[in-house]
Image (cartoon, grey):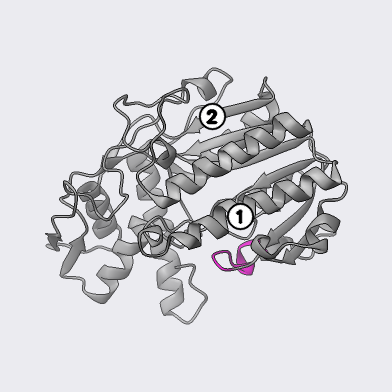
Amino acid sequence: MPIALSFKRVFITGGAGFIGSHLVDRLCESDLEVLVYDNLSFGRIENIARWLGNAKLNFEQEDLTKTGKILSTSLSGCDTVFHLAANPEVRVGAQNPRVHFEQNVTATFNLLEAIRKIGDVKTFIFTSSSTVYGEPVEIPTREDYAPLKPISIYGASKLASEALITSYAYTYGFDAIIYRLANVVGSRMKHGVIRDFMNKLTGNPEKLEILGDGTQTKSYLDVEDCIDAILLGASKYHSNVEIYNIGSEDQVNVKEIADTVCGQMNLKGVKYVFTGGIDGGRGWKGDVKIMLLNIERLKNIGWAPKLNSLQAVRKAAKSLWQQKKCGSRGKTSEL
């Protein structure tokens, strides 16, 4: 999708991660000056290796929770910030809520403070999550749905970050775009149900343990469709603070995902063992069982996903299985 970009110097946190590295690809292909900031706790330098020799890309291995002079220096002259850095593991918050507070909320606050002090940034773009809605009674869920009652620490940390970003944008005079993402899948993924199933089946190709009661049904989105949406929204937003949902228009359940992964791995007769789940069949504490976002706001400015949920899952499973097989032959595996 050709999108006219008005950015000049771009700063990306989490730029070596799953979604971040795909964004780096797209921006570098557009010949923009890009600075990537990543502590490599979830990101991999291999994800952006093709651009490391490019004079217009700079990479700094730094931690937003321990920010200082380096962050302020790096931001100088940047007109656009994409803030993707976060701890993406939803389940970890139930055991250690401080992880999500520090890596999601504190990191966001530190970044906003540096932006406030430098004053060069005109547009701040943040990848939030569908988990901020909690368990809405309105499905598909619109951006103006209320009240927002997240049921996970991860969702709460994303909602807290949204509030900080909104208040800083209004107080200090920059624009903010907040994207609430469905489950984004594709190459370079390091977590999520597709990867988990593939790892379990590699260990035991005859049986697959599936967390929950099997009725979890959610929207999945191909990472390239996600990047299209992020860039289009950033080029066509209208208000000082804009919020967009990004997702597909349909859903798949966890059994369909298991079937897809087994098919990609050429496994037949796999026995599915459902754990039964907790709190009404959830896979874990904080797991939202049913999720589907209303994406009319983005569709109204010209975006629509090319792949539906099952197609996105199938494409991601194929990519991850190819990477897994490469790893088993002694090459680097993205899994």
Q: Is residue 45 magenta?
A: yes
At a point 40% along the width and 28% down the height, the residue shown is 147
Q: Report which residue position mark 2 lands on.
A: 244
Please provide percent x and percent y for residue 115.
78, 45
Q: Is residue 206 magenta?
A: no
Residue 110 visible, this angle:
yes
Quick one: SS at disc 2?
Answer: strand
Instruction: Give the answer, above or below, for where 245 lies relative to 99.
Output: above
- Where, quadrant-wise, is the C terminus in this rendering? bottom left
Residue 236, located in which quarter of the rendered image? top right
Q: Which residues are magenta?
A: 41-48
At a point 15% along the width and 68% down the height, the residue shown is 207
- Where, quadrant-wise, is the N terminus in this rendering? top right
Please provide percent x and percent y for residue 43.
58, 64
Please provide percent x and percent y for residue 195.
37, 61
Residue 184 visible, this angle:
no
Q: CA distance from mark 2 to mark 1?
A: 23 Å
Pointer 2: residues within 10 angstroms few (<14), some, or many (20+)? many
Amino acid marked by disc 1? Thr
Mark 2 or mark 1, whichever is nearer to me = 1
Amino acid marked by disc 2? Tyr
State left or right for residue 289 relative to residue 5: left
Q: Earlier in the sequence, mark 2 or mark 1?
A: 1
State left or right for residue 52 relative to residue 278: right
Q: Report which residue position mark 1 lands on.
A: 106
Q: Which residue is situated farthest in the bottom direction here?
A: 330
318 and 58: which one is in front? 58
Quick one: SS at disc 1?
Answer: helix
